[in-house]
Image (cartoon, rainbow, N blue to C red):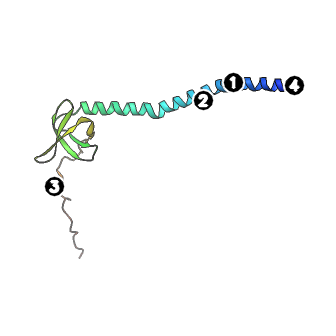
Amino acid sequence: MQGLYQLAEGAQGTSAGGGILSSLPMIALILLVFWLLIWRPNQKRRQQEMKMQSDLVPGVEVMTKAGIYGTVVEVHDNDVILEISPGTRIRMLKPGIGEIITPQADDTPVEDRPDFGDDDPKPNN
């Protein structure tokens, strides 16, 4: 009986050591998934934001991360001056710029479009 007890203890001791070695690939797989799903996309997003911030020039229409639309008036090392309405300018850090707004194909100002301000529907006779 004692021989069987010692044999069982020896088997448990080797399986515990083997358990640690068998869990290493699982840990490596978890780290790989973490890198692919979290770290890499964030790194690409940061690179795109830095490129966008370095491409800012006066005259470009932008939207801030707070949702304010404006036109870049001046660009400095760390900040920009935005004109958010005629005569109203704000100074904002470059990381606060959310995106550059691409001009639409129709360059006609909204006020000059034929459908602007047509709130009264035409009566049907």
Residue type for callout 3 = Glu
Between 123 and 28, the residue placed more toward the observer is 28
Label 3 sits on residue = 111
Which of labels 1 and 4 is toward the front? 4
Q: Marks 3 and 2, Cα distance to the nearest angstrom?
A: 62 Å
Mark 2 surroundings within 10 Å by alpha-carbon count, few (fewer than 14), some (14 through 19), many (20 or more):
few
Alpha carbon separation for disc pair 1 and 4: 25 Å
Q: How crowded is mark 4: few (under 14 residues within 10 Å), some or many (20 or more)?
A: few
The residue that mark 2 highlights is 26
User: Residue 18 got which mark?
Assistant: 1
Mark 2, mark 4: which one is toward the viewer? 4
Q: Secondary structure under badge 1?
A: helix
Work out whether mark 1 precedes mark 3 in sequence or the reverse, and give the earlier one.
1
Quadrant assignment, res 65: top left
Gap between marks 1 and 3 measured at Cα: 75 Å
Residue 32, position as x, y percentages in the image: 52, 29
Q: Which residue is drawn at 25% across and 43% down?
A: 63
> Which label lies toward us, 4 or 3?
4
